[in-house]
Amino acid sequence: MSAPGDEAIELRVHGVSGASAETIVDHPIVVRVAGDRHAGFYRVREGLGRAGGATAGVVVEAYRWGALTAGVAVRTASMLLLLPFMLGNLAVWLRPTLADRFGLLGGLCRLLAGSLTVAFTLALVGVSMNLPGWQCVPYVECRQGRPYLSWLVALPMGPRLAVLALVPLLALRVFWAVGARSARAFEGFGAAPPQERLLESTGSLAAPGIWHDERMTSWLRQIHVGLGAGTVYVSLVVAVSHDRWNGIAVALLGLTGGLVLFCAALLLVTVSVRWAGPLRRLLWILVAVATVSSLGYAVFRREAPVVVGQMPGYEGAAAGLVTAQGLLLVLIAAVTLARQHARPAGQRALLRGLGTPLVAAMSVTVTSAYTTTLVFRTADQLDRGRIPDPIRPSPPALGPLEPPVAYWWAALAGLAALLVVTAAVALTLPAARRRRRAYARRVVERDYPDAPASAAPRLAAVRDTVARSFVTEELGPTLVAFFVVSSLGLATVALDLVGIGPTQLAARLNRRHDVLAVLTAYVTDVGIWIISLLVGVLWDLGTFWPRTVHPFAPPCYAARAVPELTRRVCALAAHGPVVISGHSHGSVLAAATVLHLPSETLPRIALLTHGSPLYRIYARLYPAYLGERVLCELGERIDWRWRNLWRDTDPIGAPIFGDPDLRPGVPREAATVDVRLRDPRGVTVEPTDTVPPAVERHWPYHTQPEYQEAVRLLVGRIRGRAP
């Protein structure tokens, strides 16, 4: 029994699976002792026994934070629309090093994130002003039987487009509201430290203000709303002035275009807090003046004639945007490669160090998927079920209902990237299979040297499991291929500028226009949805990072979880030893918590990680923030009171330091951190059982005796009773 006031606590933090409190504590009856329904701390109800896997003399407490991600965002369909913004925000955190002179990489990533907002705004302009207002309403056959559109025919073209321009403006207001509400609910959990700059290169993971990003997010939100509004107003002014450019129209184009360029400049440069207030007021003045003048001009511009085809300027804007995104991706890749030399020698980087441009390209691809689906399905609906395309136009009486050809190129580029990745996976995995199976064979021979012949089938199953657990090590080149193909696909939009779209190109190669058009359309849709599903697995991992690039990204759950864990650990450590036990992604939250604990609390803290991706994924994917240097700093902060349990069968967890003799720069003390568990514990049926021991893989760890031994050792070290 521990002495009063010296109660040892094992604080368990789960991973991204969103486990229930009962599962984490491994007991059917628990009670919340702190926190709320979004994120809370739970213990077994008093008098009802101990938690599962508990160590004698240690009280188990669980931190359940799953509702901050999967419980709120993923289950809400509207939040899935924020996925491209989340990927755009994630890109900058994969930089190879913090060395970023003049903040160039951060500025380029913010500018690319702004282009995502413009892409969504242009798509909304397409489905409100271009397709219905410009292409559909003027034709009887298109508006027939559609009262929600037929009333617009009474309005001249200028007022009609002004009314329909309210749709993308309202969507921007909705994005604003969602972002502000999520910030109030999950971010800013604690007092923010003083800040000199709003848009600066993010510091280390131990920086005091890294989890207090609400002020920066608010500033970015205003810029993106101004950027989107400027896009709407430029489209409106060009459309209603296409036949007669007078002095007023030119001045309005300069004003609205200047608003877009002003917002882009604010994204590219860093802004000091001293200048943030005046710039914010100037931005809102520009938005207000542009709103009143653009909408007012369109309302009084009644004689604008209707031109068959796309709304003037719209197709060029869509093609120009995708071309600009391709150029930005090339610049981001070039800057990233230039920063590679600053990465510590010998540190192996996942994705060949190209994580930032890769995820940036992924964000553009998914944005193209979403916007293309929105525009094409709207055109298909207005065209009464016929797939619109430039080869087979709608009947003259109905009007040419067709999206810009740039959307065809963007969608097919995404599909091509998907097909190349699929082919690369099909080639890479078999090529590496021999190496993985050889390693698995050595593991099995070492762990079960005396296995009887009757256990051969079980041994084969274990070998296959070990070999499969290392598949993630082989995906780096595949994803780099995805980046290259995506960038080339975006570059082909230049063909659209000379009037060669994907279906026209196919038509020149084959006379069967109708078949090719239908095939292209349906294959494009398939590619769009498959790409969207593939990147959905990044949700919980992407929302770990603060929103320093795109303000419409899903809320950062770590902005609440890390300060909340820090506060709770400090309170518990005031009464006795605390072992922070992080499973899977929970080990990342635990590491971030230790980096933020005050120095007076650290002597009472120890760290237990299990199934941890800290080195296998995070140190190599985010070398600037959780690289080898940061992990060593983490161990030194707690005087190496750290154990990491891992299994060869675990596809996520892995050793963190391994053999320090093979890792230059890793201190000798790190040799005691990693503890390998044999899995399964045996390959034969034990006398008291009916089946062989199960292969545990990634879960659970707390049921193993090595886990309890690690907790006992760490508590003893905190109390000074163990070496």
Image: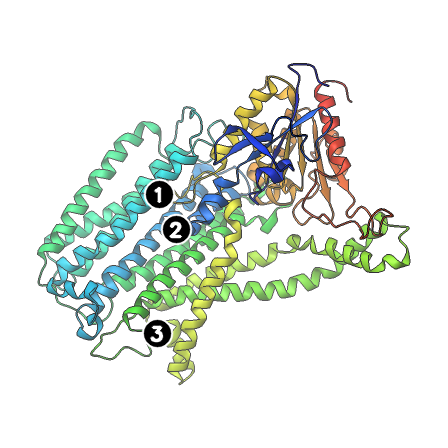
Quarter the N terminus occupies: top right
Residue that appears at 32% across and 58% down: 123
Which residue is tagged 1?
Answer: 178
If you read the primary sequence from the N terminus, does the residue marked by circle 3 or circle 2 appear first?
2
Q: Mark 3 falls on what kind of element?
A: loop
Q: Amino acid at mark 3?
A: Ile
User: Viewer-nearest of labels 1 and 3?
Assistant: 1
Q: Mark 1 falls on what kind of element?
A: helix
Which residue is tagged 3?
Answer: 387
**528 on left or right of 166:** right
If you read the primary sequence from the N terminus, does the residue marked by circle 1 or circle 3 appear first?
1
**539 on left or right of 153:** right
Q: Mark 2 falls on what kind of element?
A: helix
The answer to whether one can see residue 137 in this image is: yes
Q: Are marks 1 and 3 in contact (CB under 8 Å)?
A: no
Asked which quadrant contains residue 593, the reply is top right
Q: Are marks 2 and 1 in contact (CB under 8 Å)?
A: yes
Q: Residue furthest bottom?
A: 511
Quarter the C terminus occupies: top right
Q: Amino acid at mark 1?
A: Val
Where does residue 289 sit, x and y in percent of width and height? 17, 43
Residue 78 — which label?
A: 2
Where does residue 664 sit, x and y in percent of width and height? 71, 36
Nearest to the observer: residue 564 or residue 390: 564
If you read the primary sequence from the N terminus, does the residue marked by circle 2 or circle 1 appear first?
2
Q: Residues within 10 Å of mark 1 (few under 14, many from 20)?
A: some
Q: Are marks 3 and 2 in contact (CB under 8 Å)?
A: no
C-alpha separation, residue under disc 2 versus residue under disc 1: 10 Å
Q: Residues within 10 Å of mark 2 (few under 14, many from 20)?
A: few
**654 on left or right of 332:** right
